Amino acid sequence: MLEDTDMELVCCNTIYCPPELLLSRRSDKTFDMWSLGLILYITLSGSDPFYPKVDEDLFRAVLLGDISYSNEAWNQVSLNGKDAVKRLLVVDAKQRALTADILQHSWICGDHATTEHLLISQNRLGDFNKRRALMNAKFAERKQNIPSTPQYPVQCNRKFLPVKKTGLDAVRYAKRREYPAPSIY
């Protein structure tokens, strides 16, 4: 992505939507840094950063930055690893770490890597993938009841939204049309 370039079209799974998208703000490269933070969170802990049942609760948790680092899985993660994730999952996009910041972070550049808890992490990540596969299967079953319109085409478990529309707008649209808002679980 070019510096100082706004995105024209947003394509994401609702779980990876950053706060600025939910607030109808134009997005730039910090959008992807939020998603990277979520991917690192999942990879390091093998757990979800959010546990909502419906999109509205997910959006609320994202906007508040309500992310837990205290579960059992995080006890196994190094302080440097936790710090890298926390620098990416900052609600204020202006304060969020950028690519250069993360590439220079001691967690990436340092030689502190350990394989001590590798097997535990691999098992947790395997469990996470099984839960996600089940969630996707449930969504595929439910999406048959959700209409696909030019404004909100539904494809797999992703929503394609014009920048001026947000995930919250998609949920409101579904409710106005008396269709169930897609649950993330």
Image (tube, grey):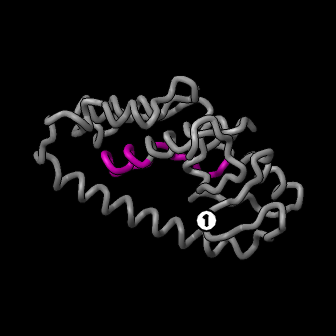
Q: Which region of the structure is painted magenta?
A: 39-55
Give the residue at mark 1.
Answer: 157
* Residue drawn at x 51%, y 40% as measured from the top left: 34
Residue 89 point in image, percent of width and height: 48, 34
Whether 40 is among the magenta residues is yes
Q: Residues within 10 Å of mark 1 (few under 14, many from 20)?
A: some
Judge whether 17 appears above or below 25 on screen: below
Task: Say above or below: 40 vs 91.
Answer: below
Any magenta on residue 75?
no
Q: In this view, does 127 lie above or below 2?
A: below
Q: Is residue 35 above or below residue 84?
A: below
The mark total stands at 1
Coordinates of residue 76 in the picture (x, y in percent): 22, 39
Q: Residue furthest front?
A: 2
Q: Which of 36 and 55 is in front in this view?
A: 36
Residue found at x 38% / y 35%: 85
At 86% from the left and 61% from the top, the residue drawn is 178
Q: In screen coordinates, is 15 left or right of 175?
A: left
Viewer-proximal residue, 55 or 156? 156
